Image (tube, rainbow, N blue to C red):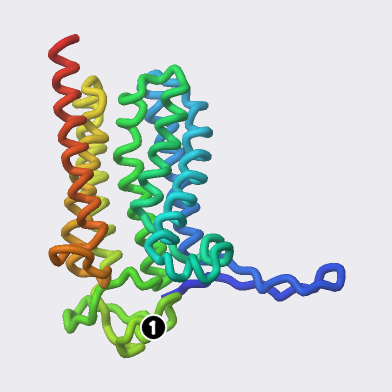
Amino acid sequence: MYPKIIEFGPFEIFGRVVGPLGIYSYGLMLALGFLTTSILLRREYQRRGFDPEIVNNIVLYAIIGGLFGAKAYSAIENWQELLKDPIGSFFSGSGLVWYGGLAVGSLAVWYVIWRSDVPTLAGIDVLGPMLALGYAFGRMGCLLSGDGDYGPPTSLPWGLSFPNGTVPPSALGFDRYARMHPTPIYEMILMLIIVAILWRIRKQYEERHGFLFGLYLILAAAERIITEFWRLTPKVALGMTMAQWLSLIMIPIGIWLIWHSRKRIQTV
């Protein structure tokens, strides 16, 4: 895989050595994901008659809250490393967990929309397909960087090797050149299907505020429950991973939002 796309340096500036500096595949995919979703989000807000300028704050709060939440979840999950080196562990470039980013990023975005003139649930609805699309970009970054999100060894013809990845298979106890389940590809395919579903029905359910985001939660949770069976994530209880348990929490929240959107239409 290709963790670094381009590398520059090191450079000497004012007598100090800086670098080497580089463009990393995971960071590039994150940037492209935020750029693409912000453009689509702005267009959707404008189409619905909302002030598109709020998108700038939504994206800013999503980036800050998402990165903080992803890093905080990872630090808690790997508390032994956190105790050994609190500052280094929290501010390192590795260890970004999607569910932590989703939770804190969603709260930050909810706060921005709640403080605006945009109806809260209607404003959040637009985020459903954007989150799914952003997740697909993120998984492309995982694939390119080979950061350990791949699955166990496989003899299937589409298995991929990650000998030069950020986390090569040898770091996880496997042969360095072993062909592994390309789980990020599985997730990208499923997430792009979710994007297509949500995007196709977005106008049909536009007046049912909360419906699209609720459906996103259910579909995204189902996707993660399925793909976790082809990942190397440690099991925490009853043969399931923490991500699967958190997904099970997302499903009733999504069901409640869909039920609430139907109840709202009946009472209007």
State left or right for residue 80 relative to residue 260.
right
How far across and how far down the image is residue 46, in percent?
Answer: 42, 24
Of 92 and 176, the residue lying toward us = 92
Asked where in the image residue 179 lies, by quadrant, the reply is: bottom left
Of 41 and 147, the residue lying toward us = 147
State left or right for residue 68 relative to residue 125.
right
Amino acid beneath label 1 = Ala
How far across and how far down the image is residue 226, in percent?
Answer: 16, 59
Residue furthest right in the image? 14
How far across and how far down the image is residue 144, in percent?
Answer: 41, 69
Element on which disc 1 rests? helix
State left or right for residue 202 relative to residue 36.
left
Residue at 27 percent across and 64 percent down: it is 185
Residue furthest top in the image? 268
Q: Which residue is mark 1?
A: 171
How far across and how far down the image is residue 253, in percent?
Answer: 21, 37
Residue at 37 percent across and 29 percent down: it is 44
In the rendered image, the vertical position of residue 106 relative to residue 139, given as above or below: above
Looking at the rendered structure, the number of numbered marks drawn on it comes to 1
Which quadrant would the N terminus be assigned to in this image?
bottom left
In the rendered image, the vertical position of residue 118 relative to residue 229, given as above or below: above
Asked where in the image residue 15 lies, by quadrant, the reply is: bottom right
Residue at 55 percent across and 69 percent down: it is 85
